[in-house]
Image (cartoon, helix red, strand yellow):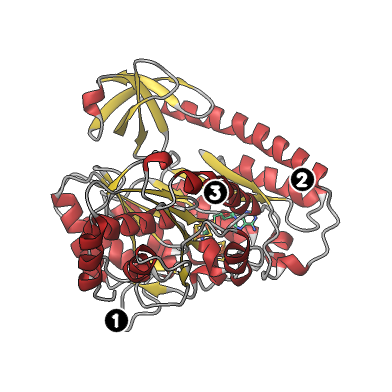
């Protein structure tokens, strides 16, 4: 990262008292983690934080580009900020994140949204102090979407949670799945040095963090770009050695690289959670070929079976894209079939969204939106039955749970996630937030299980 100390000091001197920043991150956890770094810079510059946009002096929208709906939402919000700015002309508005890395979007923002002061690219977080200073000095529109080598070590982060921490281990993606914008907006894979990761995690554990979520678009290729002989399983083993009572999670794993060594390592390392997010995307090998996923359904099932043979109760979750261009009824049925065979505890499903610049965007798609909508509803129905049934394996068992806080919808109940990444509700006191507890499971619902604190 660039040394910004003097710029930050200048901003600090210009700001005055009680300045507030509102940073909203959309999209995946890597983006949320970038948001924490953006907040780190703003805090050093003298800002405190608010969720209320009307009382903010600077608003930063940290955007996601993975689906069109995500982009539309941001444009809607930016549009509505015109009013905020009219009421408070000194308000600064910044757009950061994956949307800005697409030239046509950066152009559109510049042309059609004059209320925006700052545009900050995904690899340019360290450019924020320079841009902010310009904007504070009254410059109309400052943008930096160039690529810096700033992925490495943030000076300070303002973390969203005091007990769950996200730790990016690598940035970017080399896979170019044909539907996906991520390689275009996040660049090629860059791995952090293992010693930096280990020391960050050690610090977090010393600060009382109970869950460490290692992040990357494909953590299995961690280290491929480093000179030393570091691999993801090797990193997991090093982190597992750190003293303390905490869990290690990671996402995402690309099935083409999910090796036996990785799975053996998960089982050998006591701190690594017994859950794997293994996005299958489709149950049809032919669709997977058109997606450039580089594995067959047989290979994927082989991996799932290897895991489940070691532990039938292990938890698997996945991502599905419904309605990839020209998906046939049979191909869609194959996806339902894979859900039934693997029995995922949770499925994150998305209707295909055309992303300009990707290979799949060039395909002429003959499937109607109506058919895609129908397929999506059917998939949700099928999966609801599967997970409700599958959760029954936990009845009568005691699950270790990291408590998130009060359950929003159920008064008097607390909620948390088990080691297997299952939502668990129980009656308990708010003071348990951020603690590990044991819960005996008495009931299952279609999105969670319930039990009694022991
Ligand atoms: N690197 C991760 C995925 C990150 S994007 C992986 O490979 O697993 C998260 C999910 O968004 C993907 O798994 C995919 O299911 C979905 N997704 C990505 N591009 C999409 C698109 N164009 N339309 C719909 N869903 C998409
Ligand atoms: Fe996108 Fe594929 Fe990379 Fe995941 S692995 S980020 S889906 S290109
Ligand atoms: Fe979205 Fe960028 Fe993440 S496109 S899913 S925020 S890497």
Residue at (61, 65) in percent of width and height = 105
3 and 2 marks in contact (CB < 8 Å): no
Give the foreground label among 3 and 2. Answer: 3
User: Mark 3 = which residue?
Assistant: 82
> Can residue 353 be seen in the rendering of this structure?
yes
The span from disc 2 to disc 1 (Cα, nearest Å) is 46 Å
User: What is the crowding at mark 3: few (fewer than 14 residues within 10 Å), some, or many (at least 20)?
Assistant: some
Numbered disc 3: secondary structure: helix
| 394 horizontally vs 317: left or right | left
- Above or below, 305 against 377 in this view is below
| Residue 372's disc number | 2
> Can residue 395 be seen in the rendering of this structure?
no
Q: Nearer the viewer, residue 369 or 23?
A: 23
Q: Earlier in the sequence, mark 3 or mark 1?
A: 3
Q: Earlier in the sequence, mark 3 or mark 2?
A: 3
Give the foreground label among 2 and 1. Answer: 2
The span from disc 3 to disc 2 (Cα, nearest Å) is 35 Å
Q: Nearer the viewer, residue 191 or 58?
A: 58
């Amino acid at each position: 990262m660039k040394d910004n100390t003097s710029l930050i000091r200048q901003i600090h001197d210009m700001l005055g008292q009680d300045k507030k920043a509102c940073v909203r991150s959309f999209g995946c956890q890597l983006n949320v983690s970038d948001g924490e770094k953006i907040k780190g810079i703003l805090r050093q510059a003298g800002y405190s934080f608010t969720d209320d946009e009307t009382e903010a002096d600077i608003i930063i929208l940290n955007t996601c580009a993975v689906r069109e709906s995500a982009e539309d939402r941001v444009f809607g919000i930016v549009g509505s900020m015109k009013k905020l700015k009219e009421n408070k002309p000194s308000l600064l508005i910044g757009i950061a994140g994956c949307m800005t890395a697409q030239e046509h979007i950066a152009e559109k923002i510049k042309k059609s949204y004059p209320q925006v002061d700052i545009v900050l690219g995904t690899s340019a977080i360290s450019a924020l102090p320079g841009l902010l200073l310009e904007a504070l000095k009254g410059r109309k529109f400052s943008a930096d979407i160039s690529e810096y080598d700033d992925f490495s070590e943030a000076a300070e982060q303002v973390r969203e949670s005091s007990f769950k921490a996200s730790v990016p281990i690598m940035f970017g993606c080399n896979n170019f799945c044909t539907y996906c914008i991520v390689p275009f907006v996040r660049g090629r894979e860059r791995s952090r040095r293992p010693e930096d990761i280990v020391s960050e995690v050690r610090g977090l554990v010393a600060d009382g963090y109970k869950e460490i979520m290692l992040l990357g678009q494909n953590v299995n290729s961690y280290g491929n770009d480093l000179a030393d002989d570091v691999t993801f399983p090797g990193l997991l083993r090093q982190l597992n050695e750190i003293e303390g009572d905490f869990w290690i999670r990671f996402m995402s794993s690309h099935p083409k690289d999910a090796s036996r060594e990785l799975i053996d390592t998960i089982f050998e390392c006591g701190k690594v959670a017994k859950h794997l997010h293994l996005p299958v995307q489709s149950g049809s090998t032919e669709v997977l070929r058109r997606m450039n996923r580089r594995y067959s359904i047989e290979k994927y099932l082989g991996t799932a079976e290897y895991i489940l043979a070691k532990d039938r109760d292990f938890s698997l979750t996945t991502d599905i894209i419904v309605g990839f261009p020209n998906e046939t009824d049979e191909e869609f049925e194959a996806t339902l079939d894979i859900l039934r065979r693997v029995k995922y505890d949770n499925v994150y499903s998305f209707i295909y969204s055309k992303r300009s610049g990707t290979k799949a965007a060039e395909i002429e798609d003959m499937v109607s939106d109506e058919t895609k909508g129908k397929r999506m509803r059917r998939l949700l129905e099928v999966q609801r039955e599967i997970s409700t049934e599958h959760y029954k394996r936990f009845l009568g068992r005691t699950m270790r749970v990291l408590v998130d806080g009060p359950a929003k919808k159920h008064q008097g109940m607390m909620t948390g996630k088990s080691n297997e990444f299952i939502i668990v509700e129980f009656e308990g006191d708010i003071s348990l937030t951020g603690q590990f507890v044991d819960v005996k499971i008495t009931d299952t619902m279609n999105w969670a299980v319930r039990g009694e604190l022991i």
